[in-house]
Amino acid sequence: QKEVEQNSGPLSVPEGAIASLNCTYSDRVSQSFFWYRQYSGKSPELIMSIYSNGDKEDGRFTAQLNKASQYVSLLIRDSQPSDSATYLCAVGVSASKIIFGSGTRLSIRP
Amino acid sequence: SAVISQKPSRDICQRGTSLTIQCQVDSQVTMMFWYRQQPGQSLTLIATANQGSEATYESGFVIDKFPISRPNLTFSTLTVSNMSPEDSSIYLCSVGGGGAGETQYFGPGTRLLVL
């Protein structure tokens, strides 16, 4: 069974620090990877997508992908209290189908 | 990205009844998806809804319990039938481009409580 694993947290990070969120996946042939942010009571919103090995930066967010290790991560620089949310890692496993990890709760403490 | 709306946004229902959830997109999309998110849990795909064909259901979900319609490229409905308290959940529709692992965007969700 194809799986996406995340540490459920909560991960507590001081304001201004770097938050590091990690995800591993089981399907070696997966080619697309996504990070979603979900605030309590809201629906998931896309933060980043990444398809190639290496780093992809977008503002304060950096996604890192290592297909050999089946590992994808999200770094949040200069963490803000507004970054406190649940972060969902998602992996494309077939045409159009993606599966989600259980999410990591991130708390930014002032 | 597409603008997605869902109706109703929330509902409280009695066990044994059915609820139909609507999902409307502001542009034509090939693929629409229905997910369930139970309290404190991640998203579980219920089915993929394609226009002009039967929905494709994931393991553990059946058409009799979750009938889906997809009459055109901008609209879909999910019905939760013969509800029980275990169906209390958030139901989300999403849209994607249809390419391999292509990004999905989510509607605001329908929060359902079954008493």
Image (cartoon, helix red, strand yellow):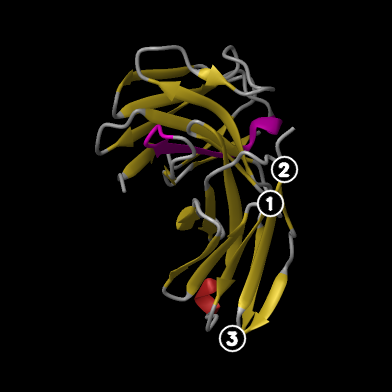
Say whether residue B60 is left or right of residue B72: right
Q: Which residue is mark 2?
A: A26
Examine the structure image and report whether residue A14 is included in the region drawn in magenta: no
Q: B62 or A89, which lies in front?
A: A89
User: Residue at image x 44%, y 41%?
Assistant: B102
> Can residue B19 be seen from the camera position used here?
no
Query: Label 3's element?
Result: loop
Say whether residue A71 is left or right of residue A50: right
Q: Residues within 10 Å of mark 3 (few under 14, many from 20)?
A: some
Q: Which residue is mark 3?
A: A15
Which residue type carries mark 1? Gln
User: Which region of the structure is painted magenta?
Assistant: B85-99
Q: Residues within 10 Å of mark 2 (few under 14, many from 20)?
A: some
Q: Are marks 2 and 1 in contact (CB under 8 Å)?
A: yes
Q: Which residue is mark 1?
A: A70
Q: Residues within 10 Å of mark 1 (few under 14, many from 20)?
A: some
